[in-house]
Image (spheres, helix red, strand yellow):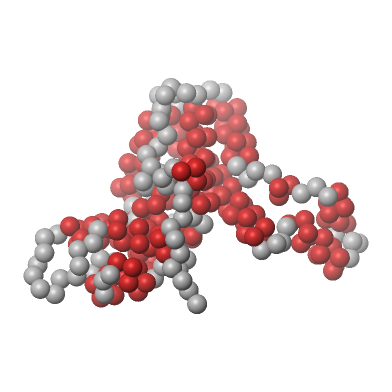
Amino acid sequence: MQHDRPARQPIGGRPPVADLSCLCMKLGGASAAATTEATAPARGRGRPPRVTAAQIAEAALAIGLDQATIRNVAERLGMSVPGLYHHVRTRDDLLAMAAAHSLGELPLPPDHGQPWTDWVLEYGRFVFDALVAQPEIIGQILASTYSSFRLAQHLEQIFTVLTTRGFTVDEADAIQRRLTEAVNGAAIAEISRRSRLDAGHARIDDLALAVQALGPEAVPLVDALVSSGRDAAGSDPFDTVRLVVAALAARYDR
């Protein structure tokens, strides 16, 4: 049985983070249509209750994206299912609107003239924390549809920071894309690690059971890892992002 869940709280008391380029912008035409419908003047009897795209997104986030449906979001908003369909056409539209809203609330980190690597790491950390705090957004990221208008606006801000440090636009775009890949991979690794721990399945323990079932002779190198008692899965996944930024700094020598 499914139950409504309380809204997830952002890490460190911060509001949800800014979207990470195209990976965090599945808003597309869905939210634009919802905003237009929600802000248009009333047209007489029979019109669905007036709600905004933000209210719809916040209701879905309060329920949890894995549990959110047109029906239970409508119930939470106190409106009919047909009334909500007037604003969002499908569940995918609903989830896209919620994901974009969640990741679009916080502006990019302030630019105080700090080294570009510090700014990039702060930006990456904001996004990493937001994805880990709301794992359901990963599914929306993997769907990889986005608003080209919001993407262009977002990239403009990133390129502005990096070009003031002497990078070309092409170099700034390459840095942003490498960072995106590293942050998403790190977030997925951290979500997976927490899920295993919550389920009581530490990686090294699962590998020990696999070695026992297969026999040490079948997987001798894995057996050596298990015997050592060392488990790299306990390290901070965000270290991957730091390594990527360090490699980019060495590559561009800035």
Residue at image coords 43%, 68%: 4
**Residue 90 left/right relative to 190:** left
Residue at image coords 47%, 23%: 114
Q: Is residue 171 above or below residue 14?
A: above
Q: Nearer the viewer, residue 83 or 76?
A: 76
Q: Is residue 22 above or below residue 120?
A: below
Q: Nearer the viewer, residue 206 or 59?
A: 59
Residue at image coords 25%, 66%: 87
Residue located farthest toward the bottom when viewing the structure as drawn: 1
Which of the 4 image quarters holds residue 57?
A: bottom left
Query: Where residue 195 sits in the image (x, y, percent)?
Result: 62, 59
Query: Where residue 149 sits in the image (x, y, percent)?
Result: 30, 47
**Residue 26 in view of the camera:** no
Residue at image coords 36%, 53%: 101
**Residue 63 in view of the camera:** yes
Q: Nearer the viewer, residue 78 or 170?
A: 78
Q: Nearer the viewer, residue 86 or 201?
A: 201
Q: How many numbered circles does the render carry? A: 0
Residue located farthest toward the right when viewing the structure as drawn: 217
Residue located farthest toward the left when viewing the structure as drawn: 44
Query: Where residue 140 sits in the image (x, y, percent)?
Result: 45, 59
Q: Is residue 201 above or below residue 75?
A: above
